[in-house]
Structures are given as C-alpha cells and as structure tokens.
Image: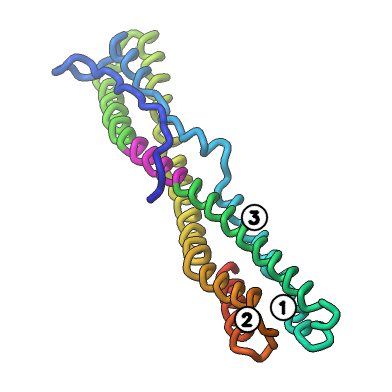
C-alpha cells in the first residue's frame, strides 16, 4: 500500500466558446485561449524532496554500518583466555550495538521508501492530468491555426493578440512534453530503487537479523567455523551484495 495521497490543486476546466461556434480571431476566443494556457501544478513535495538522492544516501549509510561490524574480532574473542578477561563479553556487546545500528538504518530506509512511494503516486497522477490536458491543447491549437488561415485579413491588433496567445499554448504544450518525460524518468529511477529496498528491507534483512541475533545471543562461544558463524557470514555477504 502506498499510503494516503498528497493533495494537489485541481484546476477547473476553461470554458469553451459557446457550442456550435469555432474559435475565431475575436475577443471571446482570445479570452478563452488565455484560460486554456494554464499549467498543471506539480505535487508540492516534488519541489522539496529528492527521493532518489535520499534513498541512495540511506543505502550508503547502511553499507558503511554493515562493513563496520567486526566479525573477525568477535570470533577471535571466543577463546578461553578472552572468556577469562571478559573480552568475549565486550566483543559481543560491540557486535550487538552494530546490529542495532544496522536495524536503525533499515527503519530509516523504510521510512524514506514510504515517502518515495507517496511522491511517485502523486507524480503519476499529475502526469495523467497533464496528458489529458495535452489532448485539449492540441485541439485548441489546431483550431487556432485554422482560424488564422481562414481570416488572414482580420483586425491587426486582434490578430497580434491572438497569435501571442497561440504561441503561449504552443510553448505550454512543449513544456508539458518535457515535464512528462522528466516524471517518467523520475518514476523509473524511484521504482528501481524502491524495488531493491523492498527486497533488502524485508526478506534479506529479516534473515540477516535472525542470524545476527543468533550469534549475539548464543550462550556458547561462537567459533568462526561453527554453523552459526557460517550462516551469518553467508547472510551478511548476501545482504551487502544486494545493496550494490
């Protein structure tokens, strides 16, 4: 579930010239074309959030936390001498702290992914609104060009204003094409990252956390060649590999 939708401003449709009347080079059509030249507002969060950058930064932080876990030191500290000096307990405490830090980074990534999903949903809705408006713009621009071709001797003042309005609609249509392309690219990038994070923060993380806790809470010394240690190393390596 992608969460509640963010609210975007809905624009009322521009009033068409009265039914049965083609656009003409007159005051009514000039006013109508001015009303048509309106931009669909982007979702507010798209102006303040950079989800791809935030998710990438969060993944890098998680990678650093995973690399900082000193498993070799933990396994080396499980001998009889370490148990006499308490080094085994200290190593386990440091390992447990590292596991908690990784878990905190995963929760932070899950929150960032949730925000990215909400923004992606709003961007998709905005793109749909723009595409619908593009069809309307295409019809109005075509009608405007027909009007110019049909009345080349129209009042020069009206013609100049009419042509400026038509040029504005052309520019808006081109800008909408660029915006839709940008939204599509952002959607693709966000979806790829979100899919990776869903894999990392669900199944893989749960396996990693299970094996890490088994090592941290073992009542017996955990040797490097033990099943517990080998299982954790395999999961840890798979967890790291998925983040790259």
- Residue drawn at x 51%, y 68% is 206
Q: Earlier in the sequence, mark 3 or mark 1?
A: 3
Cα distance, mark 2 to mark 3?
A: 25 Å
- Residue drawn at x 62%, y 57% is 104
In this view of the protein, which residue sits in the foreground, 100 or 67? 100
In this view of the protein, which residue sits in the foreground, 226 or 62? 226
- Residue drawn at x 77%, y 84% is 76
| Residue 152 position in % (x across, y down) | 30, 17
Question: Of the residues tagged 2 and 3, which is closer to the observer?
Answer: 2
What numbered label is drawn on residue 57? 3
Cα distance, mark 3 to mark 1?
A: 24 Å
213 to the left or right of 152:
right
Q: Residues within 10 Å of mark 1 (few under 14, many from 20)?
A: some
Quadrant (top left/top right/bottom left/bottom right) for the C terminus:
bottom right
Q: Which residues are magenta?
A: 118-131
Cα distance, mark 1 to mark 2?
A: 9 Å
Q: Residue 70: name its quadrant.
A: bottom right
**Residue of label 1:** 71
* Element type where label 2 sits in the image: helix
244 to the left or right of 161:
right
| Residue 212 position in % (x across, y down) | 61, 74
What numbered label is drawn on residue 233? 2
| Residue 6 position in % (x across, y down) | 43, 36
Q: Earlier in the sequence, mark 1 or mark 2?
A: 1
* Element type where label 3 sits in the image: helix
Q: Residues within 10 Å of mark 3 (few under 14, many from 20)?
A: few
In this view of the protein, which residue sits in the foreground, 85 or 192? 85
Compared to residue 124, the image places residue 244 above or below, namely: below
Query: Are circles 3 and 1 on residues that touch, CB within 8 Å?
Result: no
Q: Residue 174: name its quadrant.
A: top left
Query: Are circles 1 and 2 on residues that touch, CB within 8 Å?
Result: yes
């Amino acid at each position: 579930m992608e969460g509640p939708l963010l609210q975007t401003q809905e624009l009322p449709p521009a009033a068409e010239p009265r039914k049965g009347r083609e656009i003409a080079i007159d005051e009514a059509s000039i006013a109508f074309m001015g009303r048509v030249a309106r931009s669909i507002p982007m979702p507010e969060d798209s102006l303040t959030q950079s989800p791809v950058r935030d998710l990438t930064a969060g993944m890098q932080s998680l990678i650093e936390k995973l690399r900082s876990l000193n498993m070799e030191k933990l396994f080396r500290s499980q001998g009889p001498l370490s148990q006499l000096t308490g080094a085994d307990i200290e190593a386990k405490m440091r390992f447990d702290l590292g596991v908690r830090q990784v878990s905190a980074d995963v929760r932070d990534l899950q929150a960032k992914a949730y925000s990215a999903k909400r923004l992606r949903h709003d961007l998709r809705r905005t793109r749909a609104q723009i595409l619908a408006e593009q069809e309307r713009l295409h019809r109005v621009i075509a009608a405007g060009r027909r009007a110019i071709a049909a009345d080349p001797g129209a009042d020069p003042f009206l013609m100049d204003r009419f042509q400026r309005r038509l040029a504005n609609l052309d520019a808006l249509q081109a800008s909408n094409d660029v915006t839709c392309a940008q939204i599509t690219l952002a959607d693709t990038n966000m979806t790829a990252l979100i899919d990776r994070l869903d894999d990392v923060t669900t199944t893989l993380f749960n396996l990693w956390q299970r094996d890490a806790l088994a090592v941290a809470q073992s009542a017996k010394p955990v040797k490097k060649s033990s099943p517990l240690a080998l299982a954790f190393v395999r999961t840890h390596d798979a967890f790291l590999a998925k983040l790259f």
